[in-house]
Amino acid sequence: MFGWLTKIFIKDRDNTSDPHVRESYGKLTGITGIILNIILCASKIVTGLITGAISVVSDGINNLSDAASSIITLVGFKLSAKKPDKEHPFGHGRMEYFAGLLVSLIILLVAFELFSESLQNIIDGTVPSFASENVRIITICVLGASILVKLWMALFNRYCGKKINSVAMQATAADSATDCISTAVVLVCTVLTAFVGNFPIDAIAGIVVAIFIFYTGIKSVKSILDLLLGKAPDPELVREIADYVVNFDSNIVGVHDLIVHDYGPGRKMITLHAEVPAEGNMVQLHEIIDSIERGLAEHYNCLATIHMDPVVTTSERVNMLKAKCVEIVKSIDPGFSVHDFRVSEGKEHSNVIFDVVLTRDTRLTNAQIEAIIRQKLAEYDKTLCPVVEFDLPFV
């Protein structure tokens, strides 16, 4: 069904890297969410006011906030589709992240209000009253239908969110899923009120639902903040990019300093250093690098910038010293790596110059690591003087 809907309403629906296609997905889910949530809101608030069930009214208000969230998502997709301008040369893709963040904050606000209202009802001893058994049955039917609608919305937003890799839609899907559970709790309590008398089970259920909604909101906020602050890219993507570059041409002997910059969905930039033979033809090597940049741009739908890093590959002494330095560095921590290796020969001693990429969880200081390298290299050859720079990985 979901594929059928997107096929009807979204032109070129599989071209999900196109900002306009993403905007169309946002419009479809946003408008659908607004209409359905307003219907659910009206039906629950009317039913809740008639019965005096605070949990039903709160559930209706939650649907009203969901409608507002759908509007925010709709606006977010509209803004993120704007073309780059002078002030924002990388585009407006992160507006989608901000839309998702606002949705998550609304979820937290609803949870707080529901918790406060339910707690006050427990203190006051307020319990819902049903004018007749028919009113109770109508309430149960309204809540049951709401669960089915919300389940459909959760699955639809999840489908579209995965299709275009949208955190805003995934946040909306998570919100709809929690709504299913919260409404189910309210439904159970509505049934139980016939058997528990004046016990405030409705208010207790409201507190349970509020805690659950709050937990979901916190998780959603954290995942979106990770993207806004700069989340490390998927390790599989990093491996794919490195393999693509190294396997592109036999003249590429290594890759380091790989960074994936995220400016919003479909707006990535890749920068890296590609190691090439220092003895090679620089013009020819530059053409290869240009071809790799074009290939990356086409393959991963991104901007790609590659720094060509010449390394000596034909000197037996340099290769031998590099192997020894790699061995020493790996003995300190197998997760460390070496790049930009070169040797500056002198009459009495030779400088062995290289960079060491550390792991994020190492407890050793740079000074401690350098001291170990210096000691072990001196044991191997006292004429060697290490000159070490330390890096941290961005992937």
Image (cartoon, helix red, strand yellow):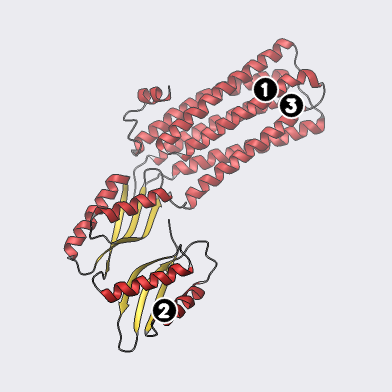
Q: Position of residue 103 (x, y in %)?
A: 54, 38
Label 2 CA crowd tier, 10 Å (few <14, some 14–19, many 20+): many
Asked if 300 appears above or below 110 in the picture, the reply is: below
What amino acid is at disc 1?
A: Leu
Q: Amino acid at mark 2?
A: Leu
Question: In front: 328, or 43?
Answer: 328
- Mark 3 is surrounded, within 10 Å at the Cα level, by few (under 14), some (14 to 19) or many (20 or more) other residues, namely many
Image quarter of residue 352: bottom left
Q: Mark 1 — residue? A: 187
Q: Which mark is residue 377?
A: 2
Q: Secondary structure at mark 3?
A: helix
Give the image location of residue 9, x and y in percent: 37, 24
Residue at 41% from the left image edge and 40% from the top image edge: 79
Disc 3 to disc 1, C-alpha distance: 10 Å
The answer to whether 12 appears left or right of 288 in the picture is right
Foreground pick, 343 / 272: 343
